[in-house]
Amino acid sequence: MSDQPMSDQPMSDQPLPLVLIVAVARNRVIGSDNRLLWKLSGDMRHFKAITMGHPMIMGRKTYDSIGRPLPGRETIVVSRDSSYQPVGVMVANDIETALLLGQAAAVRLGAPEIAVVGGGEIYRQTLDQAARVELTEVDLAPKGDTHFPPLDPAHWQERGRVAHKRDLAAGDEADYAFVTYDRITKSGATR
Ligand SMILES: NC(=O)c1ccc[n+]([C@@H]2O[C@H](COP(=O)([O-])OP(=O)(O)OC[C@H]3O[C@@H](n4cnc5c(N)ncnc54)[C@H](OP(=O)(O)O)[C@@H]3O)[C@@H](O)[C@H]2O)c1
């Protein structure tokens, strides 16, 4: 990563930023038995709005739990199984290839960034490369087998927060807040 100001560098040398999108309970749980643990209609709308038109990178287990490509987005599934090829998605056999496919897809789609949408294994392997985290704080503390790592305040700064009460009519199971974290870097550069 160069220490030069971003404006000194040609656009073609700039990788598009990676944004992690995740919903996290108070105890950092994000799922269990390969499923989500809450119903939050507002968060589903939020997820759709911020991923629409973007490439989305996800792990094979998360893709299996969804079971289909989500419309209006390009899905890149990460799996070590070279025979795994579900219809309508791209498959990468390692994270580096997934990120390259994500960059190419973002350019093709005219998207400003690449979304990483889980699950736990993929978040852990991409967090160091992320420029931003769009985190939904879910006001629950369920038992689960998959967690999101704590964001180190030395590297991450909260930039915005919008709190929401549960919509009982929509069947929401908790209050929640949309929180945006930006990576802090000494040079001011992000990717
Ligand atoms: N709350 C949220 O926002 C949120 C979002 C997404 C998912 N989730 C939850 O997270 C859970 C799933 O997460 P998870 O950690 O179990 O699985 P995951 O990250 O979705 O997928 C793991 C799989 O990805 C592939 N993989 C991982 N690292 C790889 C690498 N370096 N190279 C190639 N392939 C790699 C492997 O697939 P193969 O086994 O095929 O090789 C691995 O089994 C579920 O409960 C889901 O509901 C929560």
Image: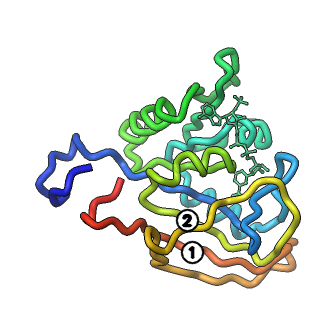
Amino acid identity at mark 2: Glu
* Lower sequence index among marks 1 and 2: 2
The answer to whether 38 appears left or right of 73 in the picture is: right
Quadrant containing ligand 1 reads top right
Q: Quick one: label 1, few (<14), some, or many (20+) residues within 10 Å?
A: some
Residue 179 numbered tag: 1
Q: How many marks?
A: 2
**Quadrant of the rendered structure where residue 168 is?**
bottom right
Residue 134 numbered tag: 2
Residue 22 is situated, as x and y percent measured from the top left of the image, at: 64, 60
Q: Tell me what residue is drawn at x 51 percent, y 42 percent.
A: 55
| Residue 115 in sight in this render | yes
**Quadrant of the rendered structure where residue 183 is?**
bottom left
Q: Quick one: label 2, few (<14), some, or many (20+) residues within 10 Å?
A: many
Q: Tell me what residue is drawn at x 66 percent, y 39 percent.
A: 59
Work out which residue is located at the far left of the displayed protein and give it.
8
Label 2 CB-ligand 1 distance < 8 A: no
Label 1 CB-ligand 1 distance < 8 A: no
Front residue of 85/184: it is 184
User: Mark 1 near mark 2, Cβ–Cβ under 8 Å?
Assistant: yes
Is residue 126 positioned above or below 154 on the image? above
Work out which residue is located at the far top of the displayed protein and give it.
83
Front residue of 148/90: it is 148
Q: Tell me what residue is drawn at x 65 percent, y 25 percent.
A: 80
Distance in Å between CA atoms under marks 1 and 2: 6 Å
